[in-house]
Amino acid sequence: MKRIIFPLVAIPMLFSLAEAKVFKAYNGDVDFNHSKHMGMYPCTECHEGPPRPFGIDKAKAHKLCIGCHTKEGVGPTRHCSGCHGNKSKDD
């Protein structure tokens, strides 16, 4: 019975982890495509320990995200607007 229950619980959890994330920021929210990054990098690139949501603030985000984008030579690295959108709720 446990062999059946675990997948039924684990699979929805994995889908919820793969959803796009929106990080609130005073100069524009940051849309983060988690599933895209999951397909390109191992979880340990960002997560310490088992993959799970973790708190991220400005300093952590800038170090982790800009650091990785700079290292990889892709994505936004120089201008705030590369990550921070100025979308309203009506857009």
Image: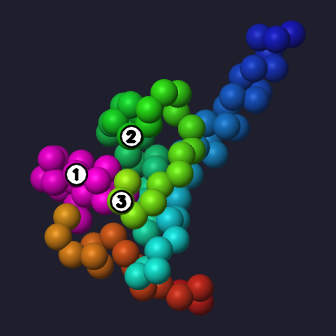
Q: What residue type is labelled 1?
A: Gly
Residue at image mark 1: 67
Q: What stretch is highlighted in magenta?
A: 61-76
Q: Residue at x 86, y 10 (%)?
A: 1
Q: Which residue is drawn at 37% across and 75% down?
A: 84
Image position of 49 with respect to 21: above or below = above
Residue at image mark 2: 46
In the image, 21: left or right of 46? right
Q: Residue at x 44, y 32 (%)?
A: 48
- Mark 2 or mark 3: which is in front? 3
Q: What residue type is labelled 3?
A: Ala
Image position of 39 with respect to 19: above or below = above
Q: Which of disc 2 and disc 1 is earlier in sequence?
A: 2
Within 10 Å of disc 1 (Cα), the crowding (few <14, some 14-19, many 20+) is: few
Mark 2 and mark 1 in contact (Cβ < 8 Å)?
Answer: no
Residue at image mark 3: 59
The secondary element bearing badge 2 is classed as loop
The colouring scheme, among rainbow, by chain, secondary structure or one colour, is rainbow
Q: Which of disc 3 and disc 1 is earlier in sequence?
A: 3
- Mark 1 or mark 3: which is in front? 3
Q: Which mark is residue 52?
A: none
